[in-house]
């Protein structure tokens, strides 16, 4: 039976980061053919690897303070320094989001190299069939045989994007050793609709615009995209983390603009223009036509009173729709919820119930906003566990 100091289940962002810092005799196990598959597909293949503004306020958790320690001790600037040390060119796209200039594969290669330097081994295409605790050691049954380790790090993520091999295995391990799992659901995910509302949105598929979307007491100003299933785009993905089934969302189609003032001005300047034409000055043409139909608008703008223009402006700034659900884990970028943070050390990521057991990355009840925040949590939590083990 092979024996290691530390076995890490999951060769994703958090697992590889941990392996690079966990010291000697480390083994990383993953059932995938290649490491870092979610890294590879992220950011359109260029990996949104962190965010300049990453901080605890950008994360959701039952305990909003849990992420503070790891994020403060291994920051976005630390990861940027690592990226630059490997000569990986990067750029800021928008809202502090950092992407590779060339390919996400550069980040994977960097992490693999860091593991090699640290002397970590990696077993790919290897499944774990069982885990036991014997004589203060973990005995892990794999398709390559049993291995023993003093430390076991659970870094196998959540349920999002099952086509990439994602499962709830990390939660099963946590429960086996007495840990509680908070409610899990798809996060950073498009919202779906049904009935007449869906037919209306399907007719607008492909239309996009900058919008302010409100849900669950928060709002985000980013792009909104109409799809054949409903609504997507960064603004929708962001609020999906806060939205719950049965709740409506409100969309300001003209954030930061004064629709009433514009309509009133156009009435005085070009009263003979149709109301739909004037709306198309503010909105994409197909959306302008749709809103005109929905609001029962016809005729020239000169025919509209101030009171009616105020009603139109109110509708444009506060369009309310009721999603029927989300696209689920199939397209979700993250899993909300996970291993309860109350039973894990915020400094080391070690279980408070079982010595030598660690949880890092997406498997934890820590979920970041869209825009590189979840990768930063992977780097920070992986580093925290790895350094704690190496210093242990």
Image: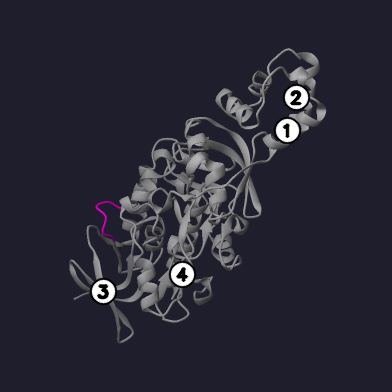
Q: Can residue 156 be spotted in the picture?
A: yes
Mark nearest the camera among 1 and 3 is 1
Query: Which residue, given by chain and number where applicable, does mark 3 sit on?
Result: 130
Quadrant of res 256: top right
Query: Which residue, given by chain and number where applicable, does mark 4 sit on?
Result: 339
Classed neighbour count for the residue bearing mark 2: other residues with Cα under 10 Å, few (<14), some (14–19), many (≥20) = many
Percent coordinates x, y for residue 291 in the rendering: 62, 30
If you read the primary sequence from the N terminus, does the residue marked by circle 2 or circle 1 appear first? 2
**Helix, strand or loop status at disc 4:** loop
Query: Which residue, given by chain and number where applicable, does mark 2 sit on?
Result: 263
The residue shown at (80%, 25%) is 305
Compute the Cα span from label 1 to label 4.
Answer: 45 Å
Front residue of 353 and 255: 255
In-image side of 297 versus 371 (left or right): right
Q: Are marks 2 and 1 in contact (CB under 8 Å)?
A: yes
In-image side of 270 versus 19 (left or right): right
Above or below: residue 368 compared with residue 220: below
Query: Which residue, given by chain and number where applicable, does mark 1 sit on?
Result: 313
Compute the Cα span from label 1 to label 3.
Answer: 60 Å
Q: Are marks 3 and 4 in contact (CB under 8 Å)?
A: no
Mark nearest the camera among 1 and 4 is 1
Range of residues picked out in magenta: 30-35
Compute the Cα span from label 2 to label 1.
Answer: 8 Å
The residue shown at (73%, 33%) is 313
Classed neighbour count for the residue bearing mark 1: other residues with Cα under 10 Å, few (<14), some (14–19), many (≥20) = some
The residue shown at (39%, 42%) is 104
If you read the primary sequence from the N terminus, does the residue marked by circle 1 or circle 3 appear first? 3
If you read the primary sequence from the N terminus, does the residue marked by circle 1 or circle 4 appear first? 1
């Amino acid at each position: 039976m092979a024996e290691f100091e530390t076995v890490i289940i999951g060769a994703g962002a958090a697992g590889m980061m941990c392996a690079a810092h966990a010291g000697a005799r480390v083994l990383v196990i993953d059932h995938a053919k290649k490491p870092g598959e979610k890294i590879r597909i992220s950011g359109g293949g260029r990996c949104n690897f962190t965010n300049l503004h990453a901080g605890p306020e950008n994360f959701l958790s039952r305990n909003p303070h849990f992420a503070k320690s790891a994020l403060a001790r291994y920051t976005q600037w630390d990861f940027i320094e690592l990226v630059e040390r490997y000569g990986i060119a990067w750029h800021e796209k928008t809202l502090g989001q950092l992407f590779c200039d060339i390919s996400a594969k550069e980040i994977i290669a960097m992490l693999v190299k860091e593991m090699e330097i640290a002397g970590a081994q990696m077993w790919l295409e290897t499944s774990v069939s069982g885990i036991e605790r014997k004589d203060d050691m973990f005995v892990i049954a794999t398709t390559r045989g049993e291995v023993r380790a003093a430390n076991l790090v659970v870094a196998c993520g959540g349920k999002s994007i099952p086509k990439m091999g994602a499962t709830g295995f990390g939660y099963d391990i946590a429960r086996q050793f007495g840990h509680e799992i908070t409610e899990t659901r798809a996060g950073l995910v498009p919202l779906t609709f049904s009935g007449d509302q869906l037919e209306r949105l399907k007719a607008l598929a492909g239309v996009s615009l900058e919008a302010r979307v409100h849900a669950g007491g928060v709002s985000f100003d980013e792009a909104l995209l109409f799809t054949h299933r409903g609504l997507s785009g960064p603004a929708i993905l962001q609020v999906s983390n806060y939205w719950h089934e049965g709740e409506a969302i409100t969309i300001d189609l003209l954030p930061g603009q004064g629709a009433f003032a514009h309509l009133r001005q156009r009435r005085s300047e070009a009263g003979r223009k149709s109301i739909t034409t004037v709306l198309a000055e503010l909105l994409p043409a197909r959306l302008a036509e749709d809103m005109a139909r929905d609001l029962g608008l016809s005729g020239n703008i000169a025919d509209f009173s101030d009171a009616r223009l105020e009603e139109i402006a109110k509708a444009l700034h506060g369009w309310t729709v009721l999603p029927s659900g989300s696209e689920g884990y199939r397209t979700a970028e993250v899993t909300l919820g996970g291993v309860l943070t109350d039973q894990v050390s915020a400094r080391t990521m070690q279980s408070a119930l079982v010595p030598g057991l660690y949880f890092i990355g997406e498997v934890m009840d820590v979920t970041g906003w869209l825009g590189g925040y979840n990768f930063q949590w992977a780097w920070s939590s992986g580093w925290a566990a790895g350094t704690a083990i190496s210093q242990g």
